[in-house]
């Protein structure tokens, strides 16, 4: 075996294969409190939807919109040193952070949709979507399409927000102003998404959620947008990692 082969073998230690899982577990341990608060809020929303209404469950998306800021704000030099002692790089942290934030946001979107389904099953009008944007309908209407539209709308708004603010909240410890910027970006993305839906209603003089052909078509377009934004966020995360690799600076206090 040559010296080159030896160096390659040493570089491919068994622990390297486990680094993604280790990085994610580390992120979960360091941010257990934040994740627990989100899960508790989701549980409360489900209980409230069961006994009263799902009208306020969409507010959870506002909490999810600042997820990048909330997790990034907790980053300190001490945490970076802890990760380094475990053999984790800043690139590992970025990958794990993206997975953790997307998992939390997916949990929120699923909870909001579940609240809407509960409302439908109980014979009440449902309100789906990302607060303050929503799709509403009476119990006799195409409720499941409204629920699906709300879930997709929420996902698009949150993914768009992550693409814009995720880098500043992940590659460095964000300032408090990033929380405000996250919410402003979230509202802007939601507004931009609402405009074409309104145009469909006005120009074509139809209701996209009336249960006819337009309903699955619009829902399908929203689903395509979600997939496109997931791919875009993945590309952005790779760019954030390249920025970290080219910068010697660590996360500040």
Image (cartoon, rainbow, N blue to C red):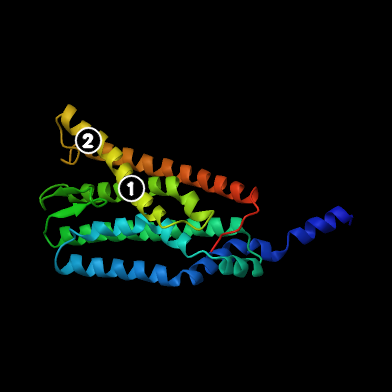
Q: Vertically, is 30 above or below 206?
A: below
Instruction: Give the number of the disc on residue 214.
Output: 2
> Which residue is found at the position 26% from the left and 60% from the top?
114
**Residue receiving disc 1:** 184
Please tell me which of labels 2 and 1 falls first in the chain.
Answer: 1
In this rendering, the answer to whether 34 lies above or below 69 is: below
Task: From the viewer's perspective, tell me whether residue 78 is left or right of residue 38.
Answer: right
Identify which residue is drawn at 38% across, 71% down.
36
> Quadrant of the image for the N terminus?
bottom right
**Is residue 204 visible in this depiction of the protein?**
no
State whether residue 107 appears in this view. yes
User: Which quadrant of the structure image shows residue 101?
Assistant: bottom left
Q: Position of residue 107 (x, y in %)?
A: 36, 61
Q: Is residue 40 left or right of residue 52?
A: right
**Are there few (<14), some (14-19), or many (20+) residues within 10 Å of tag 2?**
some
| Residue density around tag 1, few if under 14, some if 14–19, many if 20 or more, within 10 Å | some
Residue lying at the far right of the rendered structure: 2
* Viewer-side residue, 47 vs 26: 26
Q: How far from the left and from the top, in percent, is residue 222?
A: 32, 41
Question: Mark 1 falls on what kind of element?
Answer: helix
């Amino acid at each position: 075996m040559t010296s080159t082969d030896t160096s390659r073998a040493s570089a491919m230690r068994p622990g390297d294969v486990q680094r993604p899982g280790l990085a994610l577990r580390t992120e979960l341990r360091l941010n257990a409190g934040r994740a627990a608060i989100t899960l508790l809020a989701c549980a409360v929303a489900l209980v409230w939807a069961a006994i009263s209404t799902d009208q306020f469950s969409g507010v959870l998306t506002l909490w999810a919109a600042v997820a990048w800021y909330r997790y990034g704000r907790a980053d300190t030099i001490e945490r970076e040193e802890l990760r380094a002692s475990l053999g984790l790089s800043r690139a590992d942290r970025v990958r794990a952070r993206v997975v953790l934030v997307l998992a939390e946001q997916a949990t929120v979107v699923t909870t909001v949709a579940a609240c809407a389904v509960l409302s439908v099953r109980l014979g009440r009008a449902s309100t789906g979507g990302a607060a303050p944007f929503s799709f509403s309908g009476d119990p006799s209407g195409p409720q499941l399409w409204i629920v699906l539209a709300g879930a997709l709308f929420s996902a698009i708004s949150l993914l768009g927000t992550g693409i814009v603010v995720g880098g500043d909240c992940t590659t460095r410890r964000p300032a408090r102003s990033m929380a405000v910027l996250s919410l402003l970006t979230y509202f802007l993305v939601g507004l931009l998404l609402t405009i074409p839906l309104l145009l469909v209603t006005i120009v074509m003089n139809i209701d996209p959620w009336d249960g006819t052909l337009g309903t699955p078509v619009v829902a399908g377009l929203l689903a395509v947008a979600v997939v496109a934004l997931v791919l875009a966020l993945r590309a952005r995360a790779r760019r954030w990692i390249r920025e970290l690799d080219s910068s010697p600076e660590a996360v500040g206090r």
